[in-house]
Image: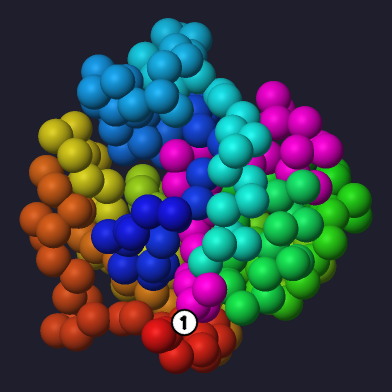
């Protein structure tokens, strides 16, 4: 478990690390950049290099058997972002391994797990082989209108909470929100950050408002995540899909 600075979660849990770029939202992947740094620091989990065409140093897809059981040790309830440094539904992650991760989530109902993927087709294909307890929130990334189809795949998943991450937002998105409980929106950060137009964010906020979908505005982005701040129309938007238990 690692404490997280991500505004919509508390801690991260990475049963796998590493990934491969699959769409334009991956082009400036923070996790790939961080993995390169961790490899140079000698971190054991980040010593496998990925294909330089789609991945990078320290970012080769790696399964961590010793990490799967970690949530059993956490006595106090936590909101847990699963695989902040990978994608659990990457094609190279065996279904049996994914099932074991889900079994741990079933066994630890005092935690709330947030799982996010860009591999929505694989998610929909194997969803019926997975348990879906109430403490598992399932999300997909939709960085532009071209990838709005991922929301259709998500709707086929029997998760208690379904959410979209429209971050980094690379263009206007008009998406059907029926069956979607939560939308996280945000601009890109980093020295190669692509700018986000205010009208794109405002449109998503208005779509959420018209469908009573919880809306969370994470950041405007820029050179650092904090560069542009988090205010939209003079306020922060930190709506969550359900009330989480009080943290100890």
> Dividing the image into 4 quarters, which one contains the C terminus?
bottom left
Query: Which x, y percent locates residue 245?
Result: 51, 89
Residue at x 77%, y 71% (from the top left corner): 133
- Rendered position, 191 above or below 150: above
On screen, residue 26 versus residue 192, left or right, reads right
Query: Which x, y percent locates residue 74?
Result: 52, 67
Query: Which x, y percent locates residue 221?
Result: 20, 53
Residue at x 27%, y 47% (from the top left corner): 188
On screen, residue 130 versus residue 23, left or right, reads right
The residue singled out by tag 1 in the image is: 240
**Which region is colored magenta?**
75-99
Q: Tell whether position 88 is magenta.
A: yes
In the figure, residue 242 lies in which quadrant? Answer: bottom right
Residue at x 62%, y 62% (from the top left corner): 72
Residue at x 24%, y 23% (from the top left corner): 41
Q: Nearer the viewer, residue 36 or 147?
A: 36
**Magenta span main SS:** loop
Q: Nearer the viewer, residue 157 or 198?
A: 157
In the figure, residue 119 lies in which quadrant? Answer: top right
- Rendered position, 172 above or below 232: above
């Amino acid at each position: 478990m690692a404490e997280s600075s991500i505004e919509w979660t508390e801690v991260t849990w990475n049963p796998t690390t590493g990934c491969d770029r699959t769409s334009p939202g991956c082009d400036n992947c923070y996790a790939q950049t961080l993995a390169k740094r961790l490899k140079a620091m000698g971190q054991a989990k980040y010593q496998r290099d990925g294909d330089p065409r789609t991945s990078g140093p320290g970012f080769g897809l790696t399964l961590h058997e010793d990490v799967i059981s970690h949530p059993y040790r956490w006595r106090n309830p936590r909101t847990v972002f699963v695989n902040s440094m990978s994608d659990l539904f990457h094609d190279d992650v065996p279904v049996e391994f994914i099932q074991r991760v889900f079994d741990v989530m079933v066994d630890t109902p005092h935690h709330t797990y947030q799982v996010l993927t860009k591999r929505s087709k694989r998610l929909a294909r194997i969803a019926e082989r997975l348990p879906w307890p109430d403490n598992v929130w399932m999300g997909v990334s939709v960085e532009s209108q071209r990838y709005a189809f991922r929301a259709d795949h998500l709707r086929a998943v029997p998760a208690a909470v379904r959410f979209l991450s429209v971050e980094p937002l690379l263009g206007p998105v008009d998406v059907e929100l029926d069956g979607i409980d939560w939308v996280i929106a945000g601009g890109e950060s980093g020295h190669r950050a692509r700018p986000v137009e205010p009208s794109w964010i405002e449109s998503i906020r208005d779509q959420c408002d018209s469908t009573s979908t919880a809306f969370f505005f994470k950041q405007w982005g820029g050179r650092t995540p904090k560069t542009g701040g988090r205010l939209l129309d003079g306020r922060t938007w930190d709506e969550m899909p359900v009330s989480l238990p009080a943290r100890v």
